[in-house]
Image (spheres, rainbow, N blue to C red):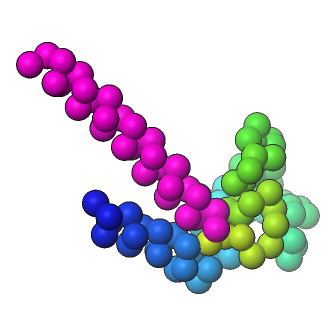
Amino acid sequence: MVAGLLTAAVLAGGVSYFASSAPDGLDATTLRGCTVNAAGEITGGSCIAQSQGEHELSGGLLADYGINGVEGTTGIAGIIGVAVTFAVGLAIFQIVRRRRKARV
């Protein structure tokens, strides 16, 4: 379990800096038919992405693969994500384990 946690932390914290800044497949598909400037803003054409709104969690702590939009915090946000995911998983595991012991 510790080895898995460390591997996930290293991948999220280190390898995430090598991720492409290009849109992923879903973003690229929704932008099909539009022209986009260097900042990623739609400047013309017609596409699905024109009807998108602001996500209600877009101002959250770990929004947009960083910490509050601070440049260069992708790895830190990844490590925080791994830690939170691990903590939630561990809590669920403990609850299930206690319930099973109580039944026996």
Identified at 55% across, 64% down, the residue is 79
Extreme right residue here?
43
Extreme left residue here?
104
Main SS of the magenta part reads: helix
Residue 1, placed above or below residue 48: below
Residue 95 picture location, percent across and down: 32, 29
Identified at 74% across, 60% down, the residue is 67
**Residue 77: quadrant of the picture:** bottom right
**Residue 92 is one of the magenta-drawn residues:** yes
Q: Is residue 28 visible?
A: no
Identified at 18% across, 18% down, the residue is 102
| Apparent side of residue 24 relative to residue 61 in the rendered image (left or right) | left
| Apparent side of residue 80 relative to residue 45 in the rendered image (left or right) | left
Residue 64 picture location, percent across and down: 72, 59
Q: Please provide the residue range marked out in magenta.
A: 76-104
**Residue 37: quadrant of the picture:** bottom right
Q: Is residue 91 visible?
A: yes
Residue 53 picture location, percent across and down: 80, 41
**Residue 78: quadrant of the picture:** bottom right
Identified at 87% across, 71% down, the residue is 39
**Residue 81 is one of the magenta-drawn residues:** yes
Residue 9, placed above or below residue 87: below
